[in-house]
Amino acid sequence: MIAWLASLALAQSDDERLADCNLRPIAGLVSYETAAQAAETNAQAFGAAAFAERTLLRGSMWGFEMHTVAGAVRVPTIAECPDGTSYHGSGALDLFSSASGLMVPLSVGEGELKLFYAGSVTGSKVQYPGSNRVFDAYGYAASGIAWTYAAPLATLVQEDNGLKTRAGDFIVGAALDVPSAPEVGTLTLGYVYSSGLYSNLSSQKLRLFATALLTQQFTMLALVKGGLDRVPLPGGSEVTLFGRRQAIVPPPTVETAPDASRVDLTSVHYQHDALADVLGFRVAFAVLPRPMLHEVAGTVVVPNDDGSGDPALESGAVAIDRLFALELGRTQMPALPWYGVDGGGAFFAELAILDMLYVRRNAPETLLLFPYAQGATEVLVRIHMAPGSVN
Amino acid sequence: MVDRAGRASVFLSAAILSGCPEEWQDEPASLVCDEVGYAIASRTFACTGDDALALERQGAFGEDFKCIAEGPPAPTADLYHCAVAILDLSCDDVDALGDDLAGWLASSPACAYVAVAR
């Protein structure tokens, strides 16, 4: 609370000091190019196609997400004031996104055809004293709901003005599932407004998972991941063990040698959940580009105990497994100077409330997408509805 | 139990959000030099694909050159032209300059006001 009050006081003094000054972010620096790339990565990771993969293609009938990363990149800025003084500092690049969509299952012979669509708005803005930061980030939260009914209209929201961006996108497609032949998996075909044809083939047989996002539209998120997913152990606990190779692609520069510019962060992950129902831990080692302890964390969960909780949470309409969950740990990233990142460790925290509201700082998953976002604060609202709850 | 967890979650949310990065942050003048090091690493990596070489050149810049951008007065946008010009070097230039960091710093007249050899 004291820290919060202190930051408010500091922000107010900045408001007064810089009120009439001309604030100029310095274009052409590594930090500036990184900020521009952050906006693009945000559009890919939290746009309509990625949203559909996380929700509708995993069985949700309806889903809504709103996500913000406050201070993903600090952009060097000169403030030139009318009285001739100037100040040297940096502004905080905030990223925001909002998406929603719907899936309709149809029986086709022995199989099931799932028609789906989703719309999204993603954006970025460098925040300076006097800007309405809360409105900029959360103003789009409400708009996201509308994309359930009019996803293509999201594409009307477009702005590209330096580091101030807004991009609308939508996906429409169909997923064919044949329950009698699970080895075939689910074939998904669709159209994405921003990138064209979308295809995906996945199998969840034997709780093995393998994911590869290698299509052109996801080059920045190129990810290869495989292993065992939530294998139950005697005593009720679950183990997840997987390897992951995440491409970390520097911001585009004036000229890049062919195939030269990319670092693969290759890591091995072990996660043990539901120990005594409420505890868990995870540890990850990075093998490349340099061996190091990548992350270590512990989790405490307050499960949603059916039969004793709030009846509103037991309806089954919205899947809530956890009332609260707190994860604390430490993550370490390699030095990535082409992002303006000197590397090193940072403590991270994630608080999940009702499996819907997540407040995070330095979450390892976020730092994989935005390696430069150390110290950024993240808020995610995620609501999914299971089949049978949407009329 | 649920009430206590609820109260705890409100407190913890506020604690995490209290660390929300400020809109404006005064920066030390040495940021101008940091950006030069990042630019050298960025161009080296983009043109060679050699992650280790990029880090090595950034480190050599920090060790072999002294940052003189430190004020007063506060740095101006002109000083940043050093880093901007380096980030604009072609891969032919990068290959030709190699480990000659003084040559890299000849990319812009502003570099003379940013760093000097130790």
Image (cartoon, grey):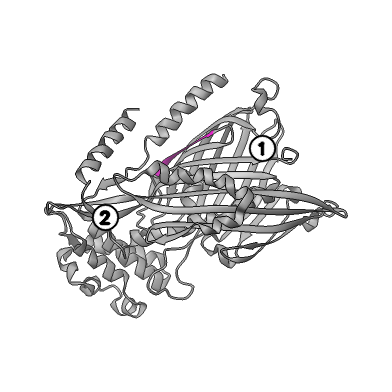
Please name whichever residue, B102 or B110, is drawn nearer the observer in this view of the structure. Answer: B110
Residue B42, image x, y percentages:
36, 66
Residue at (25, 74) in percent of width and height: B100
Q: Are marks 1 and 2 in contact (CB under 8 Å)?
A: no
Q: Is residue A15 magenta?
A: no
Mark 2 falls within which chain? A
Q: Main secondary structure of the magenta part?
A: strand
Q: Name the amino acid type tagged 1.
A: Glu
Residue at (67, 48) in percent of width and height: A102
The image shows residue A258, relative to residue A350, as above or below, that is below
Label 1 vs label 2, nearer the camera: 2
Residue A238: mark in rendering: 1
In the image, taking residue B44 as reference, residue B34 lies left or right, namely: left
In the image, taking residue B82 as reference, residue A374 lies left or right, namely: right
Question: At numbered mark 2, what does the secondary structure look like: helix, strand or loop?
Answer: strand
The answer, for residue A10, to whether it is visible in the render is: yes
Residue B22, image x, y percentages:
32, 43
| Residue under numbered circle 2 | A77
What is the crowding at mark 1: few (fewer than 14 residues within 10 Å), some, or many (at least 20)? some
The answer, for residue A370, to whether it is visible in the render is: no
Residue at (41, 65) in percent of width and height: B51
Q: Quarter-wise, where is residue A201 in the image?
A: bottom right
Q: Which residues are magenta?
A: A346-352
